Image (spheres, rainbow, N blue to C red):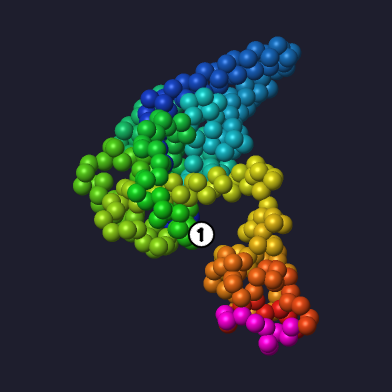
């Protein structure tokens, strides 16, 4: 693994291609080039058998340069850093800052490859790759490129499962300000956690957790280790991403309304007194009046047995002279 600093000053960890895989990709490319060169030479020899010797020599030289130099340059430029051999082995040529390989860099690599592989039998490339920290051959040094592996070994790090003790806290997190770079760094740290020594595990985890806590709120409960904190944040972030994608894909149940009614429309509850503090929103508006604290005591009230419970008082009895010892009974609207 090697760190690559991008043009935006972001450190990205990449997997540098190993020498055996690069050698196998080179052998595939050389086999393709030799087969193309021999086939093209046979076709050219059959077509220009009547031409003079100078023209035939010129055609063979141009064909050789086109195959030896043009093959890697054209393939790596059009495929963004991959020849047929690199495509088969899962390798790619990128710039030192992680950007895709450009035509100028592919041309430098192709010209240097003629000297390294075809003239000196690959000895300079082998020595340079062994000395260089990132396995660069002379063409990579001149062009400012690096060969990386896109088919790294399967990561066996711990799965991003939400710790049960932090599930309630993680549901309240504000994750909209969390940068993607810090999340990627935390994910890579979690996947490589088993390969690190205990001291490095704690030091690196504390550093990444400190950086993440500057963008995530509220802070974790006291005593939470960095590993558990990072796991909880990433697991909650993944859960919300899946929920958002499911919502966008239309997998939400259609019967569920956007704003469900707080009370079901049950007509029999409209004629019965409610024990709730606030009346349901679907009832008819009534003028403010003092309601008895215990509505079930209205029916057996001894002084007013002749009056119906929900109905208004008779017109012959004014509200001001209504009998009854209890103050605060039902007062009909004027």
Dominant secondary-structure state across the stretch colored magenta? loop
Residue ranking furthest to the bottom = 320
State the residue lying farthest toward the left. Answer: 199
Q: Is residue 147 above or below residue 171?
A: above
Residue 196 appears at what percent x and percent y?
Answer: 26, 41
Please give the residue where the numbered disc 1 appears in the rendered image. Answer: 176
Q: Is residue 215 above or below residue 27?
A: below
Q: Quadrant of residue 287?
A: bottom right
Q: Residue furthest right?
A: 315
Q: Is residue 152 shown left or right of residue 270?
A: left
Q: Nearer the viewer, residue 190 or 284?
A: 284
- Marks counted in the figure total 1
CA neighbours of label 1 inside 10 A, class few (<14), some (14 to 19), many (20+): few
Q: x, y (%) of residue 182?
A: 42, 53
Determine if the magenta segment contains residue 308: no
Magenta region: which residues? Answer: 317-326
């Amino acid at each position: 693994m090697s760190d690559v600093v991008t043009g935006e000053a972001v450190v990205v960890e990449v997997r540098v291609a190993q020498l055996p895989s690069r050698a196998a990709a080179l052998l595939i490319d050389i086999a393709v080039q030799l087969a193309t060169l021999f086939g093209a030479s046979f076709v050219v020899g059959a077509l220009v058998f009547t031409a003079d010797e100078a023209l035939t020599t010129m055609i063979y030289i141009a064909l050789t340069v086109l195959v030896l130099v043009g093959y890697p340059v054209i393939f790596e430029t059009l495929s963004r850093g991959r020849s047929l051999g690199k495509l088969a082995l899962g390798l790619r040529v990128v710039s030192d800052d992680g950007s895709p390989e450009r035509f100028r860099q592919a041309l430098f690599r192709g010209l240097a490859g003629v000297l390294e592989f075809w003239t000196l039998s690959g000895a300079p490339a082998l020595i340079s790759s062994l000395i260089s920290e990132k396995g660069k051959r002379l063409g990579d040094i001149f062009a400012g490129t690096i060969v990386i592996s896109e088919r790294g070994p399967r990561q066996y790090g711990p799965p991003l499962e939400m710790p049960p003790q932090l599930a309630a806290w993680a549901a309240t997190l504000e994750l909209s300000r969390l940068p993607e770079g810090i999340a990627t760094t935390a994910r890579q740290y979690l996947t490589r956690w088993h390969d690190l020594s205990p001291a490095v595990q704690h030091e690196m985890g504390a550093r990444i957790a400190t950086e993440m806590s500057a963008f995530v709120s509220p802070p974790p409960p006291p005593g939470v280790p960095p590993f558990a904190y990072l796991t909880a944040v990433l697991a909650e972030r993944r859960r919300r991403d899946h929920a958002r994608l499911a919502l966008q894909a239309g997998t939400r149940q259609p019967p569920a309304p956007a704003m469900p009614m707080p009370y079901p429309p049950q007509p029999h509850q409209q004629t019965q007194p409610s024990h709730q503090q606030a009346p349901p929103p679907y009832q008819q508006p009534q003028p403010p009046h003092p309601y008895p604290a215990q509505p079930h005591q209205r029916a057996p009230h001894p002084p007013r047995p002749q009056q119906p419970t929900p109905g208004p008082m008779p017109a012959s009895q004014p509200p001001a002279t209504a009998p009854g010892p209890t103050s605060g009974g039902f007062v009909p609207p004027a």
